Image (cartoon, rainbow, N blue to C red):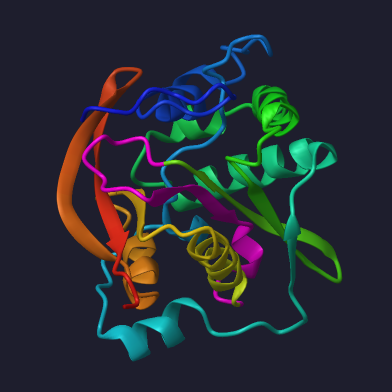
């Protein structure tokens, strides 16, 4: 998949995002903050929900199943540099819960919060032009999820456009409206900036994640690609959100 030249900020590459998330951000492969490819963002796989054999059963039913609604007030705010550690912790827990059974267990167990913290701090500090924003969602007991986005990384995506890079939620608050709140915030932000095409990538085997996005109106656009990660291979597929017009 061809990709556009990166803007002059810390932004994930199409392949670099998954490489940093998956193979370099393990306890045995710590990264350096000076590496401009060390972005923590990856495809946004399912608000941190794990894959099951369940399939979508229509938009209304799926929405009720995957996002049962908040039990407490949710507050979505823009992420700051001080949130780097929190985002890293949520990201690791999200990967370990969402991809258990999809990615090797020992690989997931070895994911590094410290490496992700370095990468997120670098990205948040470097985003001077507000091109790759991130959002935090909080409940009364603290942060429970995050999302991030920015310019599309694939050259075949028609402009003006934006891509949701990552969306993860702590597993203990799945199906509480957290993923919906984050994705809605990202969509509203990019629509307000004139983005007509919105995309994201999700692991093909992440059935519940795919159902979540489909419940929110996203549809597969036919693009798919294999990802080679540390001796194993997975496939991701691209989703698009139709223009409301």
Viewer-proximal residue among 46 and 110:
46
Which residue occupies the extreme bottom position in the image? 60
Residue at figure coordinates x 35%, y 53% from the top left: 199
Residue at figure coordinates x 24%, y 73% from the top left: 55
147 vs 183: above or below:
above
Q: Is residue 18 left or right of residue 38?
A: left
170 vs 59: above or below:
above
Q: Is residue 206 left or right of residue 12?
A: left
Question: Where is residue 14 shown, x and y percent of the image?
Answer: 36, 29
63 vs 227: above or below:
below
Viewer-proximal residue among 107 and 118:
118
Question: Where is residue 206 shown, x and y percent of the image?
Answer: 32, 55
Does residue 118 belong to the magenta stretch? no
Question: Where is residue 137 shown, x and y percent of the image?
Answer: 71, 62
Which residue occupies the extreme left position in the image? 222
Question: Where is residue 18 shown, x and y percent of the image?
Answer: 41, 30
The N terminus sits in image quarter: top left
Number of marks in the image? 0
230 vs 235: above or below:
above
Does residue 155 belong to the magenta stretch? yes
Q: Toward which corner of the image does residue 174 lie, by quadrant?
A: bottom right
Q: Is residue 245 left or right of residue 178?
A: left
Residue at figure coordinates x 57%, y 61% from the top left: 189
Instruction: Give the residues in magenta.
Output: 152-176
Q: Toward which corner of the image does residue 179 lie, by quadrant?
A: bottom right
Residue at figure coordinates x 74%, y 74% from the top left: 74
Q: Toward which corner of the image does residue 32 lie, by quadrant?
A: top right
The C terminus sits in image quarter: bottom left
């Amino acid at each position: 998949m061809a990709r556009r030249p990166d803007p002059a900020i810390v932004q994930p590459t199409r392949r670099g995002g998954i490489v940093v998330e998956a193979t370099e951000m393990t306890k045995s492969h710590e990264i350096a903050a000076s590496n401009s490819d060390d972005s923590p963002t990856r495809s946004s796989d399912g608000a941190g929900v794990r894959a099951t054999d369940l399939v979508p059963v229509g938009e209304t039913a799926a929405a009720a199943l995957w996002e049962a609604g908040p039990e407490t007030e949710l507050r979505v705010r823009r992420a700051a540099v001080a949130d780097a550690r929190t985002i890293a912790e949520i990201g690791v827990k999200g990967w370990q819960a969402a991809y258990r059974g999809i990615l090797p267990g020992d690989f997931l167990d070895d994911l590094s919060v410290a490496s992700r913290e370095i990468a997120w701090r670098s990205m948040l500090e470097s985003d001077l032009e507000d091109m790759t924003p991130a959002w935090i969602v909080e409940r009364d007991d603290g942060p429970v999820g995050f999302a991030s986005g920015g310019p599309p990384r694939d050259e075949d995506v028609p402009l003006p456009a934006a891509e949701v890079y990552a969306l993860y939620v702590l597993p203990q608050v799945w199906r509480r409206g957290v993923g919906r709140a984050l994705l809605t915030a990202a969509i509203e932000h990019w629509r307000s900036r004139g983005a007509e095409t919105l995309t994201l990538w999700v692991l093909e085997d992440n059935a519940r994640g795919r159902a979540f996005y489909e419940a929110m109106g996203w549809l597969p656009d036919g693009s798919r690609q294999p990802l080679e990660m540390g001796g194993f291979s997975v496939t991701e597929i691209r989703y698009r959100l139709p223009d409301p017009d």
